[in-house]
Image (spheres, helix red, strand yellow):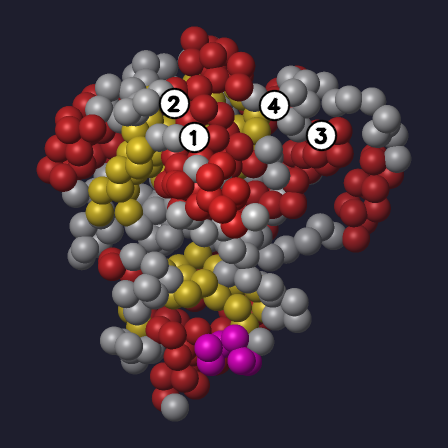
Amino acid sequence: MEERVANWIRPEIRALSAYHVQDASGLIKLDAMENPYTWPEDLRREWLERLRSVDVNRYPDPQARDLAQELRSAMQVPRDMALLLGNGSDEIIQMLALAVSAPGRSILSVEPGFVMYRMIAAWCGMDYVGVPLREDDFSLDMPALLQAIRAHQPALVFLAFPNNPTGNLFAEADMLAVLEAAPGLVVVDEAYAPFADSSFMSRLGQYDNLLVMRTVSKLGLAGLRLGLLAGPSAWLEEIDKVRMPYNINVLTQATARFALEHHQVLDGQTAAIRRDRQALFEALQSMDGMFPYPSQANFILVRTASGRAQALFEHLLHNGVLVKNLHGGHPLLEDCLRFTVGKPEENRQLLKLVEGFAHG
């Protein structure tokens, strides 16, 4: 068995580790950048009533046209730009890679960054180039980045804006310099756009190699698995050819449309998270041995005193709070944990435990 597996499974796949999600049963879940709020009960009843009219015996609209129109309005996609939907932004990343993959071609991104760029490059038989961010503030190291673009001529460049897991927005002038220098597509991943003060959506069409990717996951709809790609139709018509038929199911289409019709609820939750993010940042900043980084996402990256991250992670876990342990994941993330912004009572519990640890 093992010999046959080794003979037939590609070496680069055998070298990977499967994407791991830690069990959060019974814990305050502050590890996955989710919106912590559910819908009000009256809205939930109205949603379930809407689903009563959905027929699951028929295939969904393959283009999800009605949903696409709702998303176009909600995300302020320019009128002359095309839209492509995916089963989460992960599927869109995979579609992009499949569409441009060829021997010797590469995907380039920055590190630390979203792990799926690297993983999907391997799945699709492409090389991956990771350019380290600047150590002091996680900004783009432009000399190194531009040199890597010249040397590797990447088919795809992914830049998360804001970046995950650091939470910062890269300088707009640096992003534009990458667009000018890149020979292939530059995909600006705006998964955390609801929590940020800047976007590249309005710049679509100004650069013929710019695409913008979004998701509804951080809005409070992570369970739907729905992402979108916006950009010139000449690109998206080709990428659409590698999309799985019927990739957006009928329940997702109906639920997402319903949620967007009640966007004021999602907007209120987003505003609360932004306010609580600032309060959480200021509280962490006041604690000895805690060094939070400014964030424009719905999480805060925190560097602990040297050698304390693992112990703090275990202390939080033992007391019922799950956060993301980034220590050991990348040299620039030594002693780092990532805290998702939760409900006020969840944030208070987190801070109480962190303060107790710091003074323990």
Q: Which residues are magenta?
A: 314-319
Q: Which residue is mark 1?
A: 124
Quadrant location of residue 180? Answer: top left
Question: Type of residue at label 3?
Answer: Asn
Residue 278 against residue 200 in the figure, above or below: below
Classed neighbour count for the residue bearing mark 2: other residues with Cα under 10 Å, few (<14), some (14–19), many (≥20): some
Whole-Å distance between the Cαs marked 3 and 4?
A: 11 Å
In the displayed image of the protein, which residue is found farthest to the top?
234
Q: Nearer the viewer, residue 227 or 288?
A: 227
Q: Which residue is found at the position 24% from the left and 19% from the top? A: 183
* Residues at marks 4 and 1 touching, judged by CB atoms closer than 8 Å: no
Q: Which residue is mark 2?
A: 101
First reached walking from the N terminus: tag 4 or tag 1 = 1
Whole-Å distance between the Cαs marked 3 and 1?
A: 25 Å
First reached walking from the N terminus: tag 2 or tag 1 = 2
Whole-Å distance between the Cαs marked 2 and 3?
A: 27 Å
Residue 335 shows in the view: yes
Q: Which residue is found at the position 37% from the left and 52% from the top? A: 165
Q: Nearer the viewer, residue 224 or 127?
A: 127
Residue 281 image position (x, y, % from top left)? 38, 64
* Residues at marks 2 and 1 touching, judged by CB atoms closer than 8 Å: yes
Residue 302 image position (x, y, % from top left)? 34, 65
- Looking at the image, residue 306 sits to the left or right of residue 187; the answer is left
Q: Nearer the viewer, residue 187 or 95?
A: 95
Question: Type of residue at label 2?
Answer: Ser
Q: Which mark is residue 244?
A: 4
Where disc 1 sits, the SS reads: loop
Q: Which residue is found at the position 25% from the left and 32% from the top? A: 175
